[in-house]
Image (cartoon, rainbow, N blue to C red):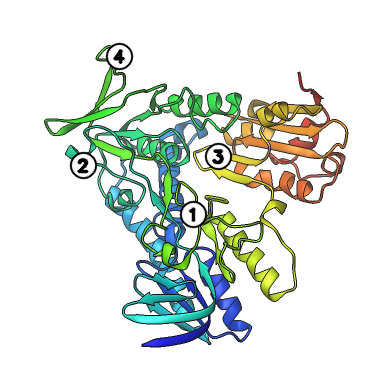
Amino acid sequence: MTTKFDAVIIGTGQAGPSLAARLAGAGMNAAIIERKRFGGTCVNNGCIPTKALVASAQAARTAERAAEYGVRIDGPVRVDMKAVKARKDAIVRRSNEGVEKWLKSTKNLTVYEGHARFESSHAVRVNGDLLEADKIFINVGGRASRPPLPGLDEVGFLDNSSMMEVDFLPEHLIVVGGSYIGLEFGQMYRRFGSEVTIVEKTSRLISREDEDVTDAVKSILENEGVSIRLSAECLTVEKRGDKIAIRLDCQSGGSEVVGSHLLLAVGRVPNTDDLGLDKAGIATDRRGYIVVDDELKTNVPEVWALGDCNGKGAFTHTSYNDYEIVAANLLDGGRRRVSDRIETYGLFIDPPLGRAGMTEAQVRASGRKALVGKRPMTRVSRAIEKGETQGFMKIVVDAETKEILGAAILGVGGDEVIHSVLDVMYAKAPYTVIQNAMHIHPTVTELIPTMLGELKPME
């Protein structure tokens, strides 16, 4: 059976549903296809469930520290992992079912559940049905990558998806990968009560960040008892009875870590290998990401790629911004571009990191004259009052234009505070705008103007 549509959207991650609703609302006859769970990674095994788990871990940590605040809790703090998982599952279910109900009740939109594969540049087959469309939008996301570690086939391991099914406390969780996913899971399971070792191949955690940021993050985790092993070359894994052993150094027989469970958090790959892109003539790069231009168009006319599968961002907010760009350009007469956006993201350990724009290292490499300001959280009254003084704030500005080039806020509220800086960056306003603004006391944000008043030339 062949059905003709004005538009077909493949995938229901952060970009797909909103785009489908906009197109249908504009009078197009549209279809959207989902092969597994409505809502994609963020809803089912990414942002929403992990932040729900982070919240439970934070509650456990706060309870452990209650005496510091003059609050007495009789007996040791105990974490019920089945209840933690049940809470997370309920939050996920509401979001997942909400997306499904929304799509299935949208006028002019047909929902297909099944695996979509291209048969030509503007024809997709799903469940035996052939869907033809003038416009096709690919929003298929990504999945956890599997590194080529010797011995991995002989041991059981977890990734960010299978971790969502864990309803017990691992005795000793070994996390391979010292970036965002690995650090968040590492801290949360340490707070739940597991022994945790994070193993990272490079010499620093989250190596895309400045060294002062990575050093501070390392200290935060180690202060909570997380063991961190860096420069772990030549990793091999093996069964050791009912345990898992990770060898870290192949030069001398080397050291090893023995734990009860293994979590792989070493990056992600796009879900583009089984879409039949070759039949459509849609180009991908060597890593499998769909090649798009600044307006998210592929090399095939009237075919777009949005979200994690296009390699232009690996976050929920970049995926949703992809939708905004495409919708504005198609329906609102806009000329929005990917290159217009400023890179920004968060690391949701506790305290969190909020990042926007260029790192200090990137500014140095650019050769431009710059000013830098930095303030430790030990000099932020709100952080002191909350008993959360780990971390610091840092901002870099162009010495000639006075525009803000980048900022890192690692500390209490950092994931929210960063937006006050980001908004000024989008306005292309001089840093003096925020420096002269009056903020509420006592807050973390109120110290940004103070920090800007203490800028020094970057050496």
Q: Are marks 4 and 2 in contact (CB under 8 Å)?
A: no
- Nearer to us of marks 2 and 3 is 2
Label 3 residue SS: loop
Tell me if 197 is positioned left or right of 210 in this view: left
Residue 102 is left or right of residue 147, and the answer is right
Measure the alpha-carbon separation of dots 4 and 2.
Answer: 26 Å
Q: CA distance from mark 3 to mark 1?
A: 34 Å
- Side of 413 where 79 appears, left or right: left
Q: Given contact means CB atoms under 8 Å apart, are the residues at marks 3 and 4 in contact?
A: no
In three-dimensional space, the C-alpha distance between marks 3 and 4, rounded to whole angstroms, equals 37 Å
Earlier in the chain: of badge 3 and badge 4, it is: 4
Q: Tag on residue 284?
A: 1
Q: What's the residue type where badge 1 is placed? A: Thr
Whether 404 is drawn above or below 374: the answer is below
- SS type, badge 4: loop
* Location of mark 3 (residue): 352
The residue tagged 2 is 156
Mark 4 to mark 1 CA distance (whole Å): 38 Å
| Towards the viewer: 161 or 20 | 20
Please provide percent x and percent y for residue 384.
Answer: 63, 31
Tell which of 104 and 61 is nearer to you: 104
Tell which circle, 4 or 2, labels the residue nearer the N-terminal end: 2
Q: Are marks 2 and 1 in contact (CB under 8 Å)?
A: no
Q: Quadrant of residue 39?
A: bottom left
**What x and y, as percent, mark residue 192?**
34, 39
Q: Which mark is residue 251?
A: 4
User: Looking at the image, is 172 positioned above or below residue 86?
Assistant: above
Which tag is nearer the camera, tag 4 or tag 1? 1
Residue projecting furthest to the top? 252
Mark closer to the chain start, 3 or 1 = 1
Q: Which residue is at a point 35% across and 60% down the rendered structure image?
A: 89
